[in-house]
Image: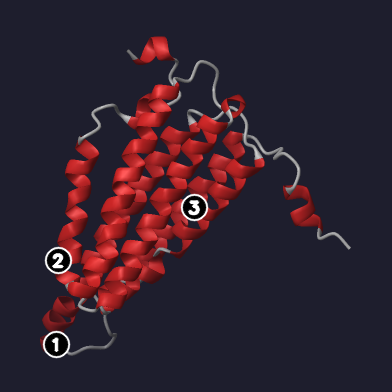
Amino acid sequence: MTNLPFGLLRREAVVGPERLLALGDAVFSIAMTLLALEITVAEGLPDDEVPHAVREAVPMIGAYLLSFAVIGALWLAQHALFRSIKTVDRWLLYLYFALLAVVAALPFPTRLISEYGDTATATACYGAAITLAIALVCGMYLRLLANPASAVPDTSPAVLREAVRRGVLLVLVFASSVPVAFFSPSLAKYWWLLAIPARLLFRGSPDTAGVPAGEAR
């Protein structure tokens, strides 16, 4: 007996990019909200213990800010990507659902790194989660290159290829931080800062993705 949901997914996706993006926006906003819920202090503390409790919450606040920035960057990246999408085929759907699954789960590695940030395991898990998220965005751009019929008419393949190169470079930064974490968790966190110059290597803004070639110049 055929499982109906998976049977439907074997066909070409019928959901439009706008509705899929609306679902994504909801998942991103919920993930951001869940990050903030991890910042807590014990209740009923005496006044003289409150400063210590706040200091103890600093790693949680730092992890929150880091993941909020990461999710915000991924949210901007998905909107830039969807400006290139005319129709959603099943592979784009698979990749996007996988991306949303990773984003929805980001509060877990965020909590790990806030509570066990000095351990290799927590740092490696966080780096691996970010690697997977970026790789899925990159995979969606690759799918548009492989199936131009899904792209907005006159989308420049050069712009899509540039987005792929940028994504691959960021994947390399975060993926390489995983083995570094087992050598030094602190060094792995500084390693993530390499994403900034890696990002700047490509001056072409991802916002131009999906703009007709004549308008992107």
- Earlier-in-chain disc, 3 versus 1: 1
- On screen, residue 85 above or below 194: above
The amino acid pointed to by label 2 is Leu
Q: Nearer the viewer, mark 2 or mark 1?
A: 2
Secondary structure of the residue carrying numbered label 1:
helix
In the image, residue 109 sits, relative to residue 10, either above or below, namely below
Q: Which mark is residue 187?
A: 2
Specify few, some or many for label 2: CA neighbours under 10 Å numbering under 14, 14-19, or 20 or more.
Answer: few
Residue with the mark numbered 3? 99
**Is 47 on the left-hand or right-hand side of 173?**
left
Q: In the rendered structure, which disc, 3 or 2, sits on the residue that comes first in sequence?
A: 3
Q: Residues within 10 Å of mark 3 (few under 14, many from 20)?
A: many
- Residue ID at (33%, 66%): 126
In percent of width and height, residue 162 lies at 35, 30
Circle nearer the viewer, 3 or 1: 3
Q: Residue beneath label 1, please?
A: 49
CB under 8 Å between callouts 3 and 2?
no
SS class of the residue under badge 3? helix
